[in-house]
Amino acid sequence: MRPHRYNLFMQANRSSLPFADRIGVLIASVLLTFALTRLIQSPRLNLILSLPGFYFAFPLTLGTFMTLLAAALTAAGMDWLTRTHPTLEKKTNFEHLMLPTLTTFVVGAPLALLPDGRAWWAGFAFGAVLLVTVFMAEYITIDPSTPTYALARAGLTALAYALFLILATSLRFSGARMFVLVPAIFLAAGLISLRILHLDGTDRWDFPWAIGIGLICAQIGAGLHYWPLTPIQFGLALTGPLYALTMLSVNLAEDIPLRRAVVGPVIIMGLAWISAIFL
């Protein structure tokens, strides 16, 4: 009986983890795209639209296209990876593509800003760890009954907020203009909140909450755009509302009374803004 139980235990654990060869190919493809961006030098192209009283200029570089290519590779690779999960069957795997694709895009943004040398290699290694973590965690969350689901869910939630903080900080550091900043914050906040709210193990999609959270974060970002804030202050000032509003949605979905439901979010947002003030 003991060998039989051991074999069943090993098979259950094996089914909750992706194939090593497939995840290795996926990670190598994405990281190679980032490495080629640094090795290949290309001229900068400015997309310019000039009208009476209006001037629009958007820089296009090889890094822009390679980051988009890496994100597309991630989406296709995660689709290929998740199709091997024994419990997926004919269910959609769209929710398991969102966060990995966003992770690749967010990792590519600071890598394009970092100078050559140890700083870039440190960012490259950190990005590789993030990608491996999110790929593994998303694969595990396909089956809510797996023993490691709770750990994977907590890891994805923490990673999602960290990604938003990195994105907001990078946008501020790069001096992104309003027409780039607002849509980027809206899309990132909306997708992250949508994925976190869907991690409750049900098939419920809270699109109204996700859109509302994205709009509020975008409005806050637009209001803070001209404030004299450092990149980390800007990132914390936006991550606090995202965390608080997402927590409020979860509390209300669990039928917690409104007065109790708002206590935690208010404390979290207050702590985030106080930290932004004193950093």
Image (tube, rainbow, N blue to C red):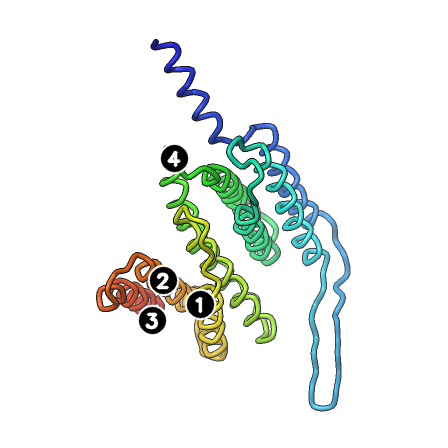
Work out whether 50 lies above or below 221: below
| Residue lying farthest to the front in this orientation | 90
Report the front residue among 191 and 273.
191
Is label 1 or label 3 in front? 1
Report the front residue among 254 and 154.
254
Q: Which residue is mark 3?
A: 277
Q: Is residue 146 visible?
A: yes
Q: Earlier in the sequence, mark 1 or mark 3?
A: 1
The three-letter amino acid code for the residue at tag 1 is Ile
Q: Cβ–Cβ below 8 Å for labels 1 and 2?
A: yes
Identify the mark at residue 213; answer none if there is no mark.
Answer: 1
Q: Cβ–Cβ below 8 Å for labels 4 and 3?
A: no
Whole-number angstrom distance, CA of label 4 to CA of label 2: 25 Å
Q: Earlier in the sequence, mark 4 or mark 1?
A: 4
Whole-number angstrom distance, CA of label 4 to CA of label 1: 29 Å
Identify the mark at residue 148; answer none if there is no mark.
Answer: 4
Left or right, residue 169 beside residue 279 = right
Whole-number angstrom distance, CA of label 1 to CA of label 2: 10 Å
Q: Secondary structure at mark 1?
A: helix
Q: Residue at x 52, y 50 (%)?
A: 99
Q: Cβ–Cβ below 8 Å for labels 2 and 3?
A: no
The three-letter amino acid code for the residue at tag 2 is Ser
| Residue 263 image position (x, y, % from top left) | 24, 65
Q: Which residue is mark 2?
A: 249
